[in-house]
Image: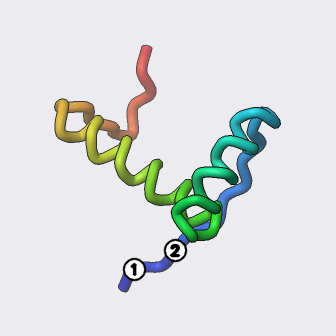
Amino acid sequence: MNVSKRIQVTLPDRLADDLQRWADYDGRPLSNLAAFLLEKIVFEAKSKGVQWDDQKKE
C-alpha cells in the first residue's frame, strides 16, 4: 500500500511566486505541481543511472 508523505520546504519568494502562477495556470494545487516536478526529476535522475543507497556520497 502506498502512503503519501508530507514534507515542509522553504522556498525563495520569487520561486514560490513562479510555482504558484504555474499551478494556477494548470488549474492544480501548488502541492500537486511540486509533487509532479519532484517525481519527474527523480525519474530523470534514475534513468541517467543515478543510484542512492545507505552510504553517503564522499
Label 1: how many Cα within 10 Å (few below 14, some 14–19, many 20+)? few
Between 21 and 30, the one lying in front of the other is 21
Q: Which mark is residue 2?
A: 1
Identified at 51% across, 59% down, the residue is 35
35 with respect to 15 (left or right): left
Identified at 53% across, 59% down, the residue is 33
Residue, disc 2: 4
Position in image of residue 16 (x %, y %): 73, 43
Label 2: how many Cα within 10 Å (few below 14, some 14–19, many 20+)? few
User: How far is the residue under mark 1 from the one under mark 2?
Assistant: 7 Å
Up-down: is 30 above or below 52? below
Position in image of residue 25 (x %, y %): 58, 59
10 with respect to 32 (left or right): right
Position in image of residue 8 (x %, y %): 73, 54
In the current view of this chain or complex, which residue is farthest to the top?
58
Rendered image quadrant of residue 32: bottom right
Quadrant where the N terminus sits is bottom left
Q: Amino acid at mark 2?
A: Ser
Q: How is the image coloured?
A: rainbow
In the current view of this chain or complex, which residue is farthest to the front?
25
Kind of element beneath mark 2: loop
Q: Are marks 1 and 2 in contact (CB under 8 Å)?
A: yes
Q: Which mark is residue 51?
A: none
Q: Amino acid at mark 1?
A: Asn
In the current view of this chain or complex, which residue is farthest to the bottom?
1
Identified at 59% across, 51% down, the residue is 22
Quadrant where the C terminus sits is top left
Identified at 44% across, 58% down, the residue is 36
Kind of element beneath mark 1: loop
